Amino acid sequence: MNAFRNAMPKILLVEDNEMNRDMLSRRLQRKGYQVVLAVDGKSGVEMARTQAPDLVLMDMSLPVLDGWEATRRLKADAATQHIPVIALTAHAMSSDCEKALEAGCDDYDTKPVELRRLLGKIEAILSGGGMASGGESAS
Ligand code: MN
């Protein structure tokens, strides 16, 4: 990790499954991340505005507003469009992954989460090296 970066990046985890949410947030906190939680897509969009996280982990299958629509709204709002979003798709279905990128997600990972792989993607994006095409600023 870059010592000059914010010591505790803030991650917004949007996940409706309580067990997944608890487990992933605990493991991220143990790695030094500050974690804020939302349980559906609508509150995820609101939390992104009020909490200004460094990154969003977005489950795609969510109540009220699914992860694709929530991501579209984040990327359509000037206040939140710069925040990188990593989609968490339930299946390794390429159509879901493509849909996530089309909705504006910067990257995706498949569930069940393999923590080391996900951490690699989080760190790549936070250090500015992992943005998929479409990111406005690389530095
Ligand atoms: Mn879900």
Image (spheres, grey):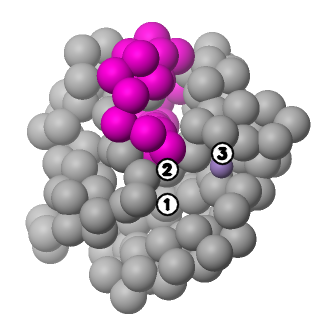
Q: Are marks 3 and 1 in contact (CB under 8 Å)?
A: no
Please state which of residues 45 and 82 is positioned toward the viewer in this rendering: 45
Instruction: Residue under label 2, please give it.
Output: 57
Residue named by callout 1: 11
Which contiguous range is marked in magenta?
81-103
Compared with 93, 47 (above or below) is below
Q: Earlier in the sequence, mark 2 or mark 1?
A: 1
Mark 3–mark 1 distance (CA, rounded to whole Å):
10 Å
Q: Secondary structure at mark 2?
A: strand
As shown in the figure, which amino acid type bears the numbered disc 1? Ile
Q: Residue at x 34, y 44 (%)?
A: 109
Q: Helix or strand or loop: what does disc 1 sit on?
A: strand
Task: From the top left corner, tell me how far across and down residue 91 is, in percent.
Answer: 43, 39
As drawn, the residue found furthest toward the bottom would be 30
Q: Quadrant of residue 79?
A: top right
Q: Residues within 10 Å of mark 3 (few under 14, many from 20)?
A: many
Amino acid type for the residue under numbered disc 3: Ala
Mark 2 vs mark 1, CA separation in Å: 7 Å
| Residue extending furthest toward the right | 64
User: Residue flagged by tag 2: what amino acid is it?
Assistant: Leu
Instruction: Report which residue position mark 3 lands on.
Output: 48
